[in-house]
Image (cartoon, helix red, strand yellow):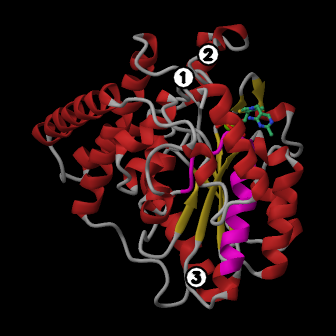
Amino acid sequence: MDTLLPVASGGAAGPLTADELRELYSLMVAVRHLDTSAIAWQRQGIIPGYAPELGQEAAQVGSGYAVDTTRDFVFPTYREMGVARTMGVDMVAYMSTHKATWHGGLYNPMESRLAPIQAVVAGSVLHAVGWAHGQTLDSQDGVALTYFGDGASSQGDVHEAMNFAAVMKAPVVFFVQNNGWAISVPTERQVAGGSVAARAAGYGIPALKIDGDDVVAVLEATRRAFAHARSGNGPVLIEAMTYRRGPHSTSDDPGRYRSLDEERDESGIDPLERLRQRLLADGIADEAFFAEALAAAKAEEEQIRTGIQALGSRPGTEMFDLVFQETTPALQAQAANWREESEHV
Ligand SMILES: Cc1ncc(C[n+]2csc(CCOP(=O)(O)OP(=O)(O)O)c2C)c(N)n1
Ligand SMILES: [Mg+2]
């Protein structure tokens, strides 16, 4: 499905260069390696929990690559490690969220342009629309990119966010990763009509339903959506069809609700392998390049793991400091109570 009119000149960029394609591959390898390592870290007791994105690397790297971190803002869920890495967020600071060192992670959202990890399903969608509307009020040209899942699309918050964004022509890109599952519930049991993209028409929002395992298709679609929103035409919805190859999180056992045969039949071709085949076929990368990308990914993972292991705990009262720009008497009272009970002061 493609109901987004072709962007006039000055919109989306032309075909990807060989350098860009190679960079996308390197990013996807780095993300794949860090993601699978994070599961091992959890099993080794280095972090208490993690939500893997195995199989969603193309959707995340392709969309994150379209972000202009000098003016856009991204509102993730709990599963967008690949987006964070692609945007250049410090990964020790990002992964600290999963160590539960400090809620929201140690990265600075204002500098990195990535809002804190959001565990409330559909919560990020509302924040993105609010931020995007703020851009309009301030006559700025930033675009909000918000992620949510097929399961989240059945939350009332998403309806309100999409309707408000369309009415106000807010510059926001709604990026749905339809990975086939909402924990143990398959998409067909909670998305009536089988498509989130089809709903956009009801809000007057153009939509693109794309192959979310094709990184080039994802990047091109996201660039088009950004160009549309940035030119004052309002929101766009992208539904990237992909597959959650791993468990919902490290505390989930998919064997209780799907079989290995189903996983094999429904997951399609691995997005990373797909890009590898394409680069080989186009003659723009060889085995030496792939080996180098993997070696770099391994070195990076080691450096991030060392950084995570070195992180100590943070002063607990910090959690009261950043709730509002200016504190309130109620918050100060809570902070004082907390200090009394936990630090006995
Ligand atoms: C408001 C709210 N309701 C329920 C939950 C529990 N929960 C966490 S993830 C999840 C499923 C979300 O599925 P989907 O939106 O498809 O995203 P995915 O996990 O597949 O990336 C649920 C129900 C929650 N975190 N927040
Ligand atoms: Mg899902």
Q: Which mark's residue is nearer the viewer, 1 or 3? A: 1
Q: Amino acid at mark 1?
A: Gly
Residue linked to disc 1? 49
SS category of the residue bearing label 3:
helix
Which region shows up in magenta? 115-134
Q: Quick check: 70 left or right of 334?
A: left
Is any part of residue 207 visible from this angle? no
Please state the horizontal and vertical placement of residue 340, each as a whole percent of the image.
66, 31
Quadrant of picture, ligand 1: top right
- Decide which of 295, 124 is in the foreground and name it: 124
Judge the density around disc 2: few (<14), some (14-19), many (≥20) Cα neighbours within 10 Å: few
* Residue 256 placement: quadrant: top right
Looking at marks 3 and 2 on the same chain, the residue that comes earlier in the sequence is marked by 3
Q: Which residue is mark 3?
A: 230
Q: What residue does disc 2 label?
A: 251
- Can the viewer see residue 236 in this picture? yes
Kind of residue sitting beneath label 3? Arg
Residue at the (45%, 56%) spot, across then down = 108
> Given contact means CB atoms under 8 Å apart, are the residues at marks 1 and 2 in contact?
yes
* Residue 256 appears left or right of 69: right
SS at mark 2 in the image: loop
Q: Does residue 66 sit above or below 71 in this rendering? A: above
